Amino acid sequence: MITQKLLLELFEYKDNKLYWKSDRAANRNKGKSAGCLDGRGYLQTKIKNVLFKNHRLIFLMQHGYVPNIIDHVDGNPLNNKIENLRPATISQNAMNAKVYCTNKSGVQNVSWHKKAKKWEVKLQIKGKRIHFGAFDDIELAVAVAKAIRNKHYKEFAGYQ
């Protein structure tokens, strides 16, 4: 099990990165930044033959615990500044996620309804998917989606 004590022995946290405190293997030298990119753009580091996301290690080092979900406030998976990391629920983290590449509106929670030929606004709130209307005007749909996200998700409403 990885503990805060072990991490404080292994790493130094400075300049929003983890640095190895000692020479532990050929690819880990004292003073060298820890981690390599995974396929999703997150830094990860191997400890005791297990890969850990660097943002989770940093959170544990600074706070003494690791929440199930850690949200990057600015949506940048490489920004592991402790002020940019916060505990979140699945819903909160989803609201602060980037827009999917398949999204035709370019805005989270706004989609094109082909049959009705209108822009729809749908959000998941407290585990239920709720329809907030269909609009001819995309700007209105975007405004409605943003207002609802702000009302229900406050600081997790997204950076879009």
Image (cartoon, rainbow, N blue to C red):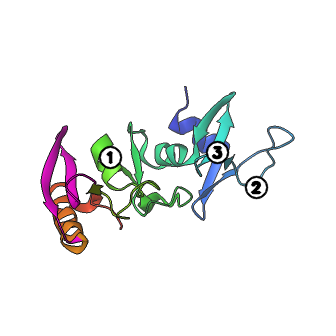
Q: Amino acid at mark 2?
A: Gly
User: Residue 104 lies in what quarter of the image?
Assistant: bottom left
Residue situated furthest right in the rendering: 26
* Residue annotated with mark 3: 38
Numbered disc in front, either 1 or 3? 3
User: Residue 133 lies in what quarter of the image?
Assistant: bottom left
Q: CA distance from mark 1 to mark 3?
A: 22 Å
- The earlier-in-sequence mark between 2 and 3 is 2
Q: Is residue 34 left or right of residue 137?
A: right
Q: Amino acid at mark 1?
A: Ala
Q: Which mark is residue 31?
A: 2
Q: Is residue 153 visible?
A: no
Q: Is residue 32 left or right of residue 111?
A: right
Up the image or down, 95 lies above or below 141; here it is above
Asked if labels 3 and 1 touch by Cβ distance under 8 angstroms, the answer is: no
- The earlier-in-sequence mark between 2 and 1 is 2
Q: Is residue 140 left or right of residue 158?
A: left
Up the image or down, 103 lies above or below 23; here it is below
Q: Which mark is residue 71?
A: none
Q: Amino acid at mark 3?
A: Asp
Q: Which residues are magenta?
A: 114-137
- The earlier-in-sequence mark between 1 and 3 is 3
* Magenta-span inclusion, residue 158: no
- Tell which of 68 and 105 is nearer to you: 105
Q: CA distance from mark 2 to mark 3?
A: 22 Å
Where is residue 145? Give x, y as percent: 21, 62
Q: Is residue 74 left or right of residue 114?
A: right
Where is residue 60? Give x, y as percent: 48, 42
- Determine whether the residue tagged by mark 2 lies in a helix, strand or loop: loop
Q: Which mark is residue 88?
A: 1
